Image: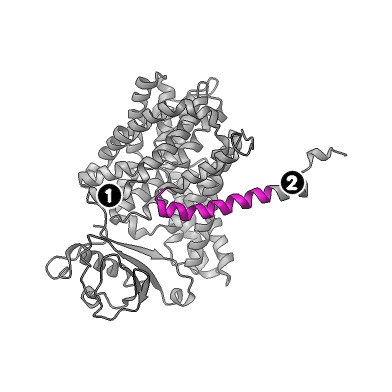
């Protein structure tokens, strides 16, 4: 059948799309360096790129909330997969219970508080107010992971933030869909207790599927791993995607399934572990860039101006009232200090998740919700900057920042993997008591050693008598067996000085 040439996607069209896509990716990659130096979250820059490409900039016209929602869910699944694979179980083990409570009880508290203020401030109905509260209450894994990398925090706090951002997407998505259905004429609205039972069943089912698939393929991968690290990395990420798809087809939570499956895989003794982490990180970055640029394209700058004041009001209530109350209600049972609770309240960053969820009422056809997407977009843009930029300063003022920050380094070195070794970077902060301590006074465990010090612009190999100074960057090589002990030792000396372990008990890694 003959068709018009205008209905065909030609090679010329392909070249144009590839040109724009490659240019966007190059600009986005370059923007990461600027973001790292300025402290600005990358999602703000990517949303800005999307706005610049849209109708008010380059003139690309895009209005398709259904496609945005589908692609948004796909990107969130990949971002959660990267988060699960990159998260060490040892860093969140002691934080699972508080994070799970914060992702469930905390979400309910936040939604109810937000709804009450939305009814009062914006004059909306309770149903619409609850829907908006559910949309904005979820923290975002991509935003949290990117900001935490530049803030030296105790593992107890980072564990709560990482686990919460991985857990809370699932219950919030279920809640938003249920509330959107309840607010839409012609759709069946169930009693709240039926919705709660269905949500609990979906979360438990999704968790079971994710854990089972992660465990099974972790066992299988060690016996059947191909020699190619690139091919193996594709297979591992495919398992996480399979967990999402399987759970969704079984009418359970795909988001909790993908995160738990990736968490199990990432903490298994996988072959090509560093290659898997590198590939997952690359795919996660690609998903973030595509998602944020797409959301920027969907937004219309002409409509955003009218939502600035409502977004600021709603954001202030969320930041100063709803989030602190949800943190207090969830974490008071676990002996978190008030300074830690204040920081966790401030560090609940929003990102792509609320903006993607704001498309749900549009796709369902919920009346009187056209303004929600614009309000949520402005809120995320403003309050991501407000919360993220001063976060290192707030951590120091509240006394929750680590004086010495230890980071994992991904080094592409096969011998290290075969020797079951790890490479860690240690930054000596201004208040660290590592200052003036000799290398030998660290009393590192057998199998761990400081192999390089970078001071200013100069790097040198230290001797046992080399004195550590503030601002130094230390390269610590350790066997997998000695890794946790070495980290505990460094942190203990940083807090208590060279006599740590003699004058004071050696503190646990989670302190």
Whether 27 is drawn above or below 278: the answer is above
* Numbered tag placed on residue 427 in the rendering: none
- Which x, y percent locates residue 176? 46, 32
In the displayed structure, 271 sits above or below 358; it is below
Can you give x and y, in whole percent of width and height, for residue 459 in the image?
37, 74
Residue nearer the viewer, 212 or 186: 186
Foreground pick, 380 / 55: 55
Tell me whether the residue at label 2 lies in contact with that at label 1, contact meaning CB atoms closer than 8 angstroms.
Answer: no
Q: Earlier in the sequence, mark 2 or mark 1?
A: 2
Report the side of 49 relative to 8 (left or right).
left
Q: Residue at x 45, y 33 (%)?
A: 378
Q: Secondary structure at mark 2?
A: helix
Q: Is residue 25 magenta?
A: yes
Q: Which residue is mark 2?
A: 13
Question: Which picture quadrant has residue 58?
Answer: top right
* Region in magenta: 17-40
Q: Is residue 214 above or below residue 179?
A: below
The percent coordinates of residue 485 (x first, y second) are 27, 69
Is 331 displayed left or right of 499 in the figure? right
- The numbered mark at residue 395 is 1
């Amino acid at each position: 059948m003959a068709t018009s040439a205008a209905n065909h996607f030609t090679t010329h069209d392909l070249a144009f799309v590839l040109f724009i896509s490659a240019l966007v990716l190059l600009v986005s990659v370059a923007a990461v360096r600027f973001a790292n130096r300025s402290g600005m979250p990358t999602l703000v820059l990517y949303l800005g790129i999307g706005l610049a490409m849209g109708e008010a900039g380059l003139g690309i016209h895009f209005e398709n909330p259904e496609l945005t929602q589908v692609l948004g869910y796909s990107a969130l699944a990949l971002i959660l997969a990267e988060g699960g694979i990159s998260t060490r179980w040892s860093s969140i083990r002691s934080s699972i219970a508080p994070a799970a409570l914060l992702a469930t009880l905390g979400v309910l508290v936040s939604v109810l508080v937000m709804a009450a203020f939305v009814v009062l401030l914006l004059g909306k109905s309770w149903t619409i107010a609850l829907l908006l509260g559910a949309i904005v209450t979820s923290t975002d894994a991509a935003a949290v992971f990117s900001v935490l990398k530049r803030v030296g925090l105790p593992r107890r706090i980072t564990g709560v933030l990482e686990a919460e951002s991985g857990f809370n997407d699932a219950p919030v998505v279920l809640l938003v869909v249920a509330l959107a259905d309840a607010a839409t004429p012609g759709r069946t609205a169930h009693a709240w207790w039926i919705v709660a039972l269905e949500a609990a069943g979906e979360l438990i089912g999704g968790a079971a599927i994710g854990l089972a698939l992660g465990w099974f393929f972790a066992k299988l991968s060690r016996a059947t791993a191909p020699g190619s690290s690139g091919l193996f990395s594709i297979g591992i990420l495919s398992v996480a995607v399979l967990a999402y798809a399987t759970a969704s087809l079984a009418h359970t939570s795909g988001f909790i399934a993908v995160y738990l499956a990736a968490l199990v895989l990432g903490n298994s003794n996988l072959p090509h572990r560093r290659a898997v982490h590198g590939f997952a990180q690359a795919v996660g970055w690609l998903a973030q860039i595509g998602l944020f640029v797409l959301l920027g394209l969907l937004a219309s700058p002409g409509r955003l101006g009218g939502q600035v004041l409502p977004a600021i009001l709603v954001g202030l209530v969320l930041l100063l009232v709803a989030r602190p109350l949800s943190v207090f209600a969830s974490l008071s049972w676990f002996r978190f200090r008030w300074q830690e609770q204040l920081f966790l309240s401030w560090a609940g960053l929003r990102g792509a998740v609320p903006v993607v969820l704001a498309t749900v009422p549009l796709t369902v056809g919920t009346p009187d919700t056209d303004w929600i997407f614009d309000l949520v977009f402005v809120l995320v843009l403003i309050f991501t900057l407000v919360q993220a930029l001063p976060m290192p300063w707030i951590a120091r003022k509240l006394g929750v920042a680590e004086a010495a920050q230890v980071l994992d380094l991904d080094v592409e070195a096969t011998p290290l993997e075969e020797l079951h070794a790890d490479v860690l970077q240690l930054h000596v902060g201004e208040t660290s008591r590592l200052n003036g301590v000799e290398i030998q006074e660290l009393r590192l465990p057998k199998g761990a050693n400081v192999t390089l010090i970078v001071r200013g612009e100069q790097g040198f190999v230290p001797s046992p008598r080399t004195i550590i100074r503030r601002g130094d960057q230390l390269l610590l090589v350790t066997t997998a067996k000695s890794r946790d002990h070495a980290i505990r030792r460094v942190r203990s000396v940083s807090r208590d000085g060279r006599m740590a372990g003699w004058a004071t008990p050696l503190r646990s890694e989670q302190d």
